[in-house]
Image (cartoon, grey):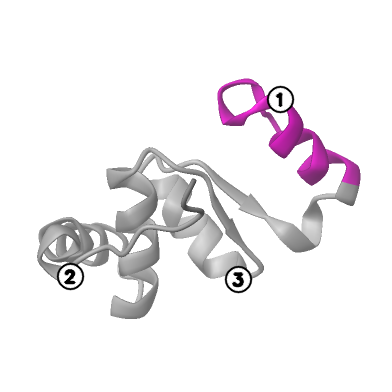
Amino acid sequence: MESYEIADESVLFDTAWVVAEDTGCSGFDSYFIALAEIKNAVLFTDDSGMHHHAGDVGAQSVLVRETDVEQIENFFSIGSDKFRV
């Protein structure tokens, strides 16, 4: 079982561009948010700006600095579809 996947920029670019235009976030942040959107994944970040912009486009994001360890552990034990911060 692989624990990672390499994402080609060509898959991310268009979505990242829209995220950047819609939110005003940096290009760097837009790629992480785009990846979370495309893969329907939860974005774990300690960057409050990135967290805010992810929410602006409907991507599920967890701001690590405001989430206790038990909640994060719970995410990995029950899965993202039942996780709420």
Check disc 1 and report its element: helix, strand or loop: helix
Which residue is at a point 17% across and 70% down the rendered structure image?
Answer: 9
Q: Which residue is mark 3?
A: 47
The first of marks 1 and 2 along the sequence is: 2
- Magenta-highlighted residues: 70-85
Q: Amino acid at mark 1?
A: Ile
Check residue 9 in the rendering and tell me which mark sits there, or answer none: 2
Left/right placement of residue 12 relative to residue 63 reads: left
Q: Please tell me which residue is depicted at 19% across the width and 61% down the height of the picture.
A: 12
> What residue sits 45% from the left and 42% below the top?
41
- Which quadrant would residue 31 be assigned to in this image? bottom left
Main SS category, magenta section: helix
What label does residue 18 carry, if any? none
Q: Position of residue 21 (x, y in %)?
A: 19, 64
Calculate the distance from the C-alpha at mark 3 to the C-alpha at mark 1.
Answer: 25 Å
Residue type beneath disc 2? Glu
Determine crowd level at label 3: few under 14, some 14-19, many 20+ residues with C-alpha closer than 10 A: few
